[in-house]
Image (cartoon, rainbow, N blue to C red):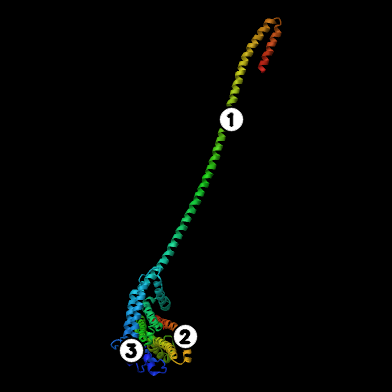
C-alpha cells in the first residue's frame, strides 16, 4: 500500500490501479520471504490451525458453539463435497479436501478483512501450488487404481468411441488431463481474486481521489465509496464461491480417476 | 520468475514467484498435516460418537418396546389362563353342589321310607298284640258271659248253646 500512495502523490493526476499494485516490498532485510502475501499465508495457517484445534478438541456429542461452527465447515466439505461426489472411498480424501477448502477460503477472505485487505490467492504462485497438488493427487490415484498402462490408454483412447474420432479426441483428452485441468483450476481462482481486488481498488482509491478534487467531484466521491462497499459484499460471495469451486473440481477429478470408465 | 524488488516495473502477474511457491508448498503441507492429525480424527470421533449415541438410543428404545410387548402378551396370557381356571373351578363347584344335593335328597328319601316302614311294622305288631289281647279278653268275657248265661238260664240249654255258638262265630268272623 505504501507504493500506491507514493505513486499517487508523485503523479498528481489519478493513476488507475494496475497489476503493480499487487506487488509488495520486502519489509525485512530485503528478503523475498518477508512480504505481505507470505505473511498472510502463514497467518492463515496459524489461524485455521488454532480455530479448528480449539473447535475439535473436545469432540463432544453435544457440541459447543465453537465446535458446532467448526463441525459445520468440516461437515460441509466431508458430506456435501467428498461423500456425495467421491462415494464410498471418500474418507481418504477428506483431509486434503478439507485443508484445501479452508486454506483457500481463509486466504480469499483476507481480501476484505480490515487491515489485512489482500487476497493471497491473487498472487498466482499460491493457486499454482494448490493446482499442482490436485493434479498430482488425481493422476496418482488414477494410476494406482487402474495401473499406469490402462490409465494412460483410457485417457488417450477413450473407450466406446469410433476409431476415427480419436484423431480429434486424443489430443483434446491429453490436453485436458495434462494442461487444461490444472491450469484452469489455478487461473480461475487467481483471476477471480485478482480482478476482485482490482475492482475494489478502483472504487476505493477512485473515491479517495475524488475527495481531493473540486467540490463537484467531492459530491460524487460518496457514491464511489458506497459502490466499493457494495462490491465488498459481492467479493465475499465470490471468495466463498471460488473456494467451493476449487474444492468441488478437485473432488470431481478424484472421483473421475477412481471411476473405472472415464 | 520475477523479483519483487522490481516492483516499479511492469510484471507479468501470471508468472509464479519462487519464494511464494516454496512458502505456499510448505504452508499448505503444514496445514494439511495439522488438520489431518489433529482435527479430522477428532471431528470423526465426535460424529461417530453422535451416530452411536443416536443409534444406541433408538436400539435401546426398540428393545424396551419389545420387552414391554412381551410382558404384555405374557400378562394377557396369564390373565386369560386364570380366567379359564376360575371358570372351570366354578363349574366344578356347581357340579359338586348338585351332586351333594342329589345325594342328600336320596338319603332323606331313604330315611323317610325307612321311618314309614318302621311305623308300618310297629302298627302291625300293635295290631297283632291287640288282636291277641282281644282274643284273650274275649275268651274271658265269653267264659264270663257263658257262666252268666249258664247260671241264669240253665233251663233253656239249647238256646244257650246257640247263643254261645253265634257269639263264637261272630268272633271268628271278626
Secondary structure of the residue carrying numbered label 1: helix
Residue B48's quadrant in the figure? bottom left
Residue B70 lies, in percent from the top left, at 46, 57
Q: In the image, what residue occupies the spot 54% across and 38% down? A: B100
Q: Nearer the viewer, mark 2 or mark 3?
A: 2
Left or right of residue A140, residue B147 in this image: right
- The residue labelled by disc 2 is A226
Disc 1: CA contacts within 10 A as few (<14), some (14-19) or many (>=20) = few
Quick check: marks 2 and 1 in contact, CB under 8 Å? no
Q: Which mark is residue B113?
A: 1
The residue marked by circle 3 belongs to what chain?
Answer: A
Q: Nearer the viewer, mark 2 or mark 1?
A: 2
Tags 2 and 1 on a common chain: no
- The residue labelled by disc 3 is A25
Q: Which mark is residue A37?
A: none
Quick check: marks 2 and 3 in contact, CB under 8 Å? no
Disc 2: CA contacts within 10 A as few (<14), some (14-19) or many (>=20) = some
Residue A250 lies, in percent from the top left, at 39, 82
Amino acid at each position: 500500500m505504501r507504493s500506491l500512495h507514493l505513486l499517487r502523490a508523485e503523479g498528481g493526476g489519478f493513476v488507475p490501479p494496475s497489476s503493480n499494485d499487487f506487488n509488495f516490498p520486502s519489509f525485512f532485510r530485503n528478503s523475498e520471504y518477508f512480504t505481505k502475501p507470505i505473511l498472510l499465508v502463514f497467518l492463515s495457517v496459524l489461524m485455521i490451525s488454532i480455530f479448528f484445534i480449539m473447535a475439535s478438541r473436545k469432540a463432544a456429542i453435544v457440541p459447543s458453539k465453537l465446535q458446532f461452527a467448526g463441525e459445520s465447515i468440516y461437515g460441509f466439505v466431508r458430506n456435501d463435497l467428498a461423500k456425495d461426489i467421491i462415494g464410498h472411498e471418500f474418507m481418504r480424501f477428506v483431509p486434503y479436501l478439507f485443508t484445501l477448502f479452508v486454506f483457500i477460503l481463509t486466504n480469499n477472505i483476507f481480501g476484505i478483512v480490515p487491515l489485512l485487505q489482500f487476497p493471497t490467492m491473487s498472487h498466482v504462485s499460491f493457486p499454482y501450488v494448490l493446482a499442482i497438488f490436485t493434479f498430482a493427487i488425481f493422476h496418482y490415484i488414477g494410476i494406482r487404481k487402474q495401473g499406469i498402462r490402462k490409465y494412460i490408454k483410457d485417457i488417450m483412447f477413450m473407450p466406446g468411441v469410433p476409431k476415427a474420432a480419436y484423431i480429434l479426441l486424443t489430443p483434446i483428452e491429453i490436453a485436458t488431463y495434462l494442461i487444461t485441468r490444472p491450469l484452469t483450476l489455478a487461473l480461475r481462482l487467481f483471476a477471480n481474486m485478482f480482478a476482485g481486488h482490482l475492482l475494489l481498488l478502483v472504487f476505493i482509491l477512485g473515491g479517495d481521489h475524488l475527495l481531493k478534487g473540486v467540490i463537484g467531484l467531492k459530491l460524487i466521491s460518496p457514491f464511489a465509496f458506497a459502490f466499493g462497499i457494495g462490491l465488498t459484499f459481492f467479493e465475499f460471495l465470490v471468495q466463498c464461491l471460488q473456494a467451493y469451486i476449487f474444492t468441488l473440481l478437485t473432488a470431481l477429478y478424484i472421483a473421475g480417476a477412481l471411476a473405472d470408465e472415464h | 520468475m520475477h523479483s519483487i524488488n522490481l516492483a516499479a516495473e511492469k510484471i507479468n502477474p501470471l508468472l509464479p514467484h519462487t519464494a511464494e511457491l516454496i512458502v505456499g508448498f510448505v504452508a499448505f503441507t503444514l496445514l494439511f498435516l495439522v488438520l489431518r492429525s489433529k482435527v479430522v480424527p477428532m471431528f470423526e470421533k465426535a460424529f461417530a460418537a453422535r451416530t452411536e449415541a443416536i443409534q444406541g438410543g433408538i436400539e435401546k428404545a426398540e428393545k424396551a418396546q419389545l420387552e414391554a410387548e412381551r410382558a404384555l402378551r405374557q400378562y394377557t396370557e396369564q390373565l386369560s389362563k386364570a380366567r379359564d381356571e376360575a371358570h372351570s373351578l366354578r363349574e366344578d363347584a356347581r357340579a359338586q353342589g348338585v351332586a351333594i344335593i342329589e345325594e342328600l335328597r336320596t338319603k332323606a328319601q331313604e330315611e323317610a321310607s325307612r321311618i314309614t316302614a318302621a311305623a308300618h311294622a310297629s302298627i302291625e305288631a300293635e295290631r297283632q298284640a291287640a288282636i291277641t289281647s282281644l282274643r284273650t279278653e274275649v275268651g274271658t268275657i265269653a267264659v264270663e258271659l257263658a257262666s252268666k248265661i249258664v247260671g241264669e238260664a240253665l233251663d233253656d240249654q239249647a238256646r244257650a248253646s246257640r247263643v254261645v255258638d253265634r257269639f263264637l262265630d261272630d268272633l271268628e268272623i271278626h
